[in-house]
Image (tube, rainbow, N blue to C red):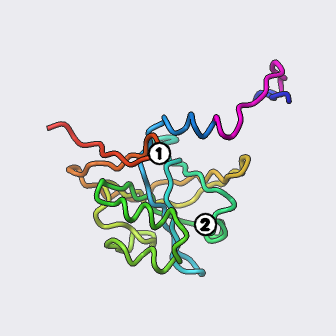
Amino acid sequence: MTITAIKNAVTEVLPPVTPEAYREGMSSLAAAVNVVTTTGPEGRAGFTATAVCSVSDTPATLLVCLNRGASVHQVFKNSTHLVINTLTSQHQLISNTFGGKAPMNERFEIGDWVESTTGCPRLADAAVSFDCIITDVKSVATHDVIFCQVVDIKQDPEADALLYYQRGYHSACKDA
């Protein structure tokens, strides 16, 4: 297999890593745990994501990756807005519920959900919540990369953060 670089230049013929090797490597990439939520004609929906990162501060933009095979994909594909809720160490049950196969209405029975500026569910006690308008979506391999412009932020400056590392949850606490 050849790998084509961004400028259409063909690099050396190198085999890509296997999916298993990639997943093993990614297990050592610590990441904040988030629940991404939206609302629309299909109702409320949400999923657990660690593939969230900043794109720019001008304008304030984040990206989140969503597997096109996920049960919530169609709902998010039809959405114009979402909230990225960064979880605290107290939210492991919420993470597991939104990351599992629970019916959508049952997912929102856990936690204190309020309405955001855009009308999406926002976790009231999240470490930080980014209320966003979806500005672009790019399909890459098995996922959609959703670009979102931030229109409101709610933050708890005293909160810790729930991290996922080495296939388990960890807490990142503020220094005393």
On the image, which quarter does residue 34 sit in?
Answer: bottom left
Residue labelled with disc 2: 76
Q: Which mark is residue 167?
A: 1
* Quadrant in which the N terminus appears: top right
Is 55 situated left or right of 108 in this image?
right
Residue 168 on the magenta span: no
- Give the residue type that dot 1 points to: Arg
Which residue is drawn at the image coordinates 46% and 47% (left, top)? 60
Is 155 situated left or right of 63 in this image?
left
Q: How far apart are the alpha carbons under marks 2 and 1?
A: 26 Å
Provide residue 126's location: percent of width, then percent of height.
Answer: 32, 59
Q: Which residues are magenta?
A: 8-21
Q: Main secondary structure of the magenta part?
A: loop
Picture layout, residue 92 above or below residue 62: below
Badge 2 element? helix
On the image, which quarter does residue 7 sit in?
Answer: top right
Picture layout, residue 21 above or below residue 139: above
The number of numbered discs placed on residues in the rendered structure image is 2
Query: Which is closer to the viewer, label 2 or label 1?
Result: 1
Badge 1 density bin: few <14, some 14–19, many ≥20, Cα 10 Å? few
Is 159 situated left or right of 141 in this image?
left
Which residue is drawn at the image coordinates 43% and 41% (left, top)? 165
Badge 1 element? loop
Provide residue 74's location: percent of width, then percent of height.
Answer: 67, 69
Foreground residue, 165 or 63? 165
- Give the residue type that dot 2 points to: Phe
Provide residue 102's location: percent of width, then percent of height.
Answer: 51, 73
Which residue is drawn at the image coordinates 64% and 34% (left, top)? 21
Contact, CB < 8 Å: mark 2 with mark 1?
no
